[in-house]
Image (cartoon, rainbow, N blue to C red):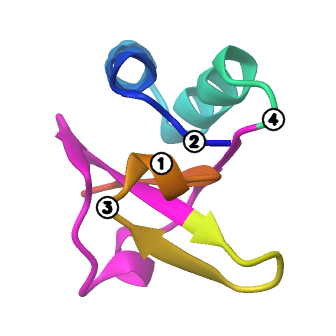
Amino acid sequence: MAINAEQLTHVARLTLQCVTLNDAVKAVREALPGFRASAVDALDMRGETPVLRIGDRDLYLMQSDGHCWSVTADPGQAVGLVLTQHM
């Protein structure tokens, strides 16, 4: 499942509206059924480049070969996303 520009914009808006990072992940899961969404500590993503910076949160698109996960900048390859929050 890929994600398009309209969906990314919707995710950004949802993320801005949510008070907590976990609420943002829950909102994304509800808005994009079948698309994986997770929250991790920002340190876990050090060295990676986010696709979007949303306030104090970063969004990373993730691709998978069915076993391993990796960060991608290509929305057409994305099967999920990770959100982090800067403290």
Image coordinates of residue 31 in percent, x first then y, are 65, 16
- Secondary element type, mark 4: loop
Q: CA distance from mark 4 to mark 2?
A: 11 Å
The local crowd at label 2, few if under 14, some if 14 to 19, many if 20 or more residues have their Cα within 10 Å, is some
Q: Which residue is mark 1?
A: 76
Q: CA distance from mark 3 to mark 2?
A: 12 Å
- First in sequence: mark 3 or mark 4? 4
Q: Amino acid at mark 4?
A: Gly
Q: Which residue is mark 4?
A: 34
- Secondary element type, mark 2: loop
Q: Amino acid at mark 1?
A: Gly
- First in sequence: mark 3 or mark 2? 2
Task: Write down the quadrant of residue 49 in the picture.
Answer: bottom left
In the image, which is nearer the foreground, mark 1 or mark 3?
A: 1
Residue at figure coordinates x 71%, y 29% from the top left: 29
Residue bounds of the magenta highlight: 35-62
Q: Which residue is mark 2?
A: 2
In the image, which is nearer the foreground, mark 4 or mark 2?
A: 2
Which residue is more in the foreground, 59 or 40? 59
Assess whether residue 9 is covered by the magenta stretch. no
Q: CA distance from mark 1 to mark 4?
A: 15 Å
